[in-house]
Amino acid sequence: MAKAVSAILAMAALGLAQCAVRAPQDIGAIYDPPMVCDACEQWNLPQTPFKVFGNVYYVGTKGLSSILITGKAGHVLIDGALTQSAPLIVQNIETLGFSIKDVRFILNSHAHYDHTGGLAALQRLSGAVVMASAPSAKAFLRGNVMEDDPQFGFGPKGNAFPAMKDVRVIADQQVVHLGDIALTAQFTPGHTPGGTSWTWQSCEGKTCLNFVFADSLSPFSPPEYRFSDQGGLQAALAHSIARIAQLPCDIMMTTHPMFFNMAEKAALAHKNPTKNPFIDPDACATYAAKNKNKLARKLAKENQP
Ligand SMILES: [Zn+2]
């Protein structure tokens, strides 16, 4: 034993103990094990990161959003996709010339594994403060959805994500400040009890635009959950849908890039850099209307004799 200790001391003296080369097995110590789901592989396809407008960048994968808002006092990151998305998000941030270490706040749309899975590792890597609504924070600390989540019935295995140790609870309409970045929490429960959308302004020269990062608003659940039952989230979801429709909205993004035609818009932006295809003042109303229809269909099904 004494021999081993002296060997370690000798290595430390030579600087070998701090060897920067990372063994492959250490990757697992930084990142959480990959999640397995039917869509996971497709969702996690790498996406080249790009600037949306001003200080706002898309750093997610092809199928799951992650948004970086940069500033001199540090950056804010919204959503962490799957566990296996975390290294891609870190890489995307670096490709844009920023560092995960400068992320000060991590925000979230809702506490489901496909938007929350990467957050624990991203928090460890950045040392950022994770902020969430009270119901989302409970789920974050548990590493799973709570009993009142419409998707609870899918079971603990399918719903699990890496638990976080430290989450700061925020209130509806609370403004998160970081230097000149100011994001407002817009609670939009319904898809989950703690669902949160985020709004802020971003400027490019003299042009300032209203951003909305809209949470998922779909009434998705296993068949045994009924939104229309007492304690169900029908009224909350209807209210959230109406709330999103009324927000000042120049650029809307949401949890899954397919719901704001991210790929098409990114391709258009590449073709014609003078016209920003992400600017669409109707986007929030359109997104809300689609989800209003989904809720109506779900309720009709629930109320079938
Ligand atoms: Zn979800």
Image: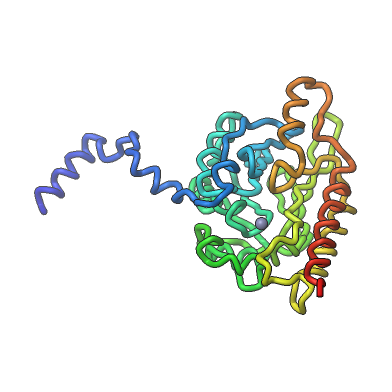
Q: Is residue 130 left or right of residue 254?
A: left
Quarter holding the N terminus is bottom left
Of 216 and 68, nearer the camera is: 216
**How far from the left and from the top, in percent, is residue 236?**
80, 67
Visible in this render: residue 175? no
- Residue 43 shows in this picture: yes
Q: In the rendered view, does 135 fall on the left or right side of 210?
A: left
Q: Quadrant of the C terminus?
A: bottom right
Q: Eyeballing the image, is 2 above or below 240? A: above
The image quadrant that residue 172 belongs to is: bottom right
Which color scheme is applied?
Answer: rainbow
Relative to 147, 216 lies left or right: right
Furthest residue to the bottom?
Answer: 230
All told, the count of numbered labels is 0
Give percent across and percent down for residue 164: 52, 60
Residue 261 in picture, x, y percent from top left: 76, 38
The residue depicted at 59 percent of the width and 44 percent of the height is 103
Q: Is residue 226 above or below residue 253?
A: below
Residue 166 vs residue 240, the one in the foreground? 240
**Ligand 1, what quadrant?**
bottom right
Relative to 295, 36 lies left or right = left
- Identified at 52% across, 53% down, the residue is 120
